[in-house]
Image (cartoon, rainbow, N blue to C red):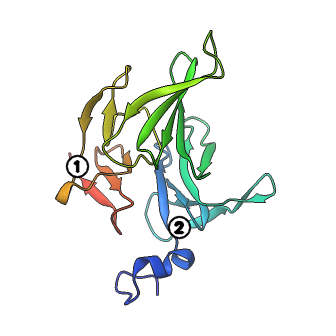
Amino acid sequence: MCDAFSELPPVATESSCGRPLGLRFHKNSGSLYIADAYMGLMRVGPNGGEATVLATKAGGLPLRFTNGVDIDQVTAQHEMVTSSGDSTGRIMNTDRTHLVVALTGPCKLLKYWIRGPKANTSEPFADLPGYPDNVRSDGKAIRIGAEGEKLQEMKGHQNVRPTEAVERTDGKIYLGSVELSYVGIVNP
């Protein structure tokens, strides 16, 4: 039922087969961590194979629509983001004065101040050409400058935009999109 040859449309099987929305490699171990909307936090070992479920709950509560995952490359600790209906990703800037928050529906990035004279206020940061899904400081998929200007955008066949991009140590970039039912690989 969950193989590529299923006669059912993907939307009919995703609650039982999974919907991976966030991907991150742990560089030292080579493991791929997956935030799956239905299955929770999962991991695939460095040799591939089937994913193992690591967590379906956090703090005693079930994970609902797990959307993103980040891995500390030193400790291998992970942090997950679940969708709340409004934002799908957050990232702290380098001087720790504000967060940049991805707002999926309105296709925007928002700057939320946590320190300084603007603390506890927010302001628009960037309008985006598509639906953001997670936000990272790695400069993949779409690059936004420090002032919110679009610097570069990655597009695939028929202008499909990736919503998740991870890079392995071999230089390959793995791309996912909510518009596609597969993961794309870009070779160096």
Q: Is residue 114 left or right of residue 111?
A: right
Q: Nearer the viewer, mark 2 or mark 1?
A: 1
Pointer 2 or 1: first along the chain: 2
**Looking at the image, which is closer to me, 21 or 74?**
21
Examine the rendered structure and indicate whether residue 186 appears above or below residue 102. Answer: below
Examine the rendered structure and indicate whether residue 2 appears above or below residue 144. Answer: below
- Viewport quadrant of the C terminus: top left
Density class for disc 2 (Cα within 10 Å; few <14, some 14-19, many ≥20) is some
Tell me where residue 78 appears, x and y as whole percent.
61, 45
Secondary structure of residue under mark 2: loop
Examine the rendered structure and indicate whether residue 144 appears above or below residue 164. Answer: above
User: Which residue is at a point 52% across and 42% down the rendered structure image?
Assistant: 89
Q: In this view, does 160 lie to the left or right of 70?
A: left
Dividing the picture into quadrants, the one containing residue 71 is top right
User: Which residue is at a point 54% across and 15% down the rendered structure image?
Assistant: 95
Residue furthest to the top in view is 117
Secondary structure of residue under mark 1: loop
Residue furthest to the right in view is 60
Q: Which mark is residue 51?
A: 2
Instruction: Return the residue at label 1.
Output: 155
Could you give the CA–CA distance between mark 2 and mark 1, rounded to whole angstroms?
A: 28 Å
Tell me where residue 105 appears, x and y as whole percent.
46, 50
The kind of residue on which mark 1 rests is: Lys
Tell me where residue 31 appears, x and y as whole percent.
49, 53
User: Which residue is at a point 62% across and 44% down the rendered structure image?
Assistant: 79
Dividing the picture into quadrants, the one containing residue 121 is top right
**Looking at the image, which is closer to me, 118 or 50?**
118
The kind of residue on which mark 2 rests is: Ala
Tell me where residue 135 appears, x and y as whole percent.
46, 39
Q: Is residue 116 left or right of residue 177?
A: right
Q: Are marks 2 and 1 in contact (CB under 8 Å)?
A: no
